[in-house]
Image (cartoon, helix red, strand yellow):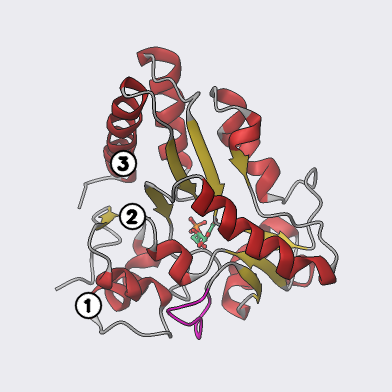
Amino acid sequence: RFPTAADGSKYVAREIDKLVRARNAAGKPTVLGLATGSTPVGLYRELIRLHKEEGLDLSRVVTFNLDEYLPMPKEDAHSYFRWMHETFFNHVNIPWGNIHVPDGTLAAEDVDRFCADYEKRIRAAGGIDIQILGIGRTGHIGFNEPGSPRNSRTRMVTLDGITRRDAAPGFFGEENVPAQAITMGVASILDARRLFLMAYGEHKAGVVFKALEQPPTEAVSASFLQEHPDATVVLDDAAAAELT
Ligand code: F6R
């Protein structure tokens, strides 16, 4: 628990910095699972600063993003592909070939094959070392909306109405928010060796309480983090306000 979101984000950036430097020294890659949205912006800003000012070399980093809207052209102003490049990738030295974001341009008949392949690529990279997560007001991690099974894998999902309403301002109206997405599954996320879930602001306090202090349930996919051996939840005071 940190006084501000900036403090929490700096803590997570330092943990990533430590792992990447240790792996670089051993000549080994670091595999990061990444999220979009408002929550990780401060984390990416701090990682960019560490790269530019403190010599953090990200050239051996491999990344897998959690999700992407479907359908969604890569160059669209709303695509997570574009957002990740503008917010982070364009400012650091991760080789472009090491970057993986689910493909929002797929035809329906190609989605299942793509999703199975995404899982294979994560395994072939050695699995995710550190997974970054935010939490939606539905309790989703990635786009694993209520009802997502504990054993779910990368797949196409239908977005919850609350999630689409929360995204609506950026899309000039809920009717413009895509109804579907590709997301890593709950099991794909829990396979990561280490997880950091960040939540900042009073609007997250209710769902943070459900995720942390009520028994794990498909109704709140973030609650499954309770069963992970190395999951850290990073909160500001406002998001922690309803915890006992
Ligand atoms: C984004 C993602 C989502 C967000 C969540 C919180 O890639 O997977 O689970 O982390 O919707 O979004 P913000 O941070 O905008 O409140």
Q: Is residue 114 above or below residue 49?
A: below
Towards the viewer: 133 or 209: 133
* Mark in front: 2 vs 1: 2
Q: CA distance from mark 2 to mark 1?
A: 18 Å
The answer to whether the residue labelled 2 contacts the one labelled 1, judged by CB atoms less than 8 Å apart, is no
> Up-down: is 194 above or below 30?
below
- Of 199 and 156, nearer the camera is 156
Provide the residue span drawn in magenta: 145-152
Name which of mark 1 and mark 3 comes first in the sequence.
Answer: 3
Q: Give residue 132's position: percent from left, percent from top.
A: 41, 51
Q: Which residue is mark 1?
A: 213
Q: Which residue is mark 2?
A: 195
Check disc 3 and give the amino acid type: Val
- Res 14 quadrant in image: top left
For the residues labelled 1 and 3, the Cα–Cα distance comes to 22 Å
Q: Is residue 225 magenta?
A: no
Image position of 94 (left or right of 16): right
Corner quadrant of residue 237? bottom left
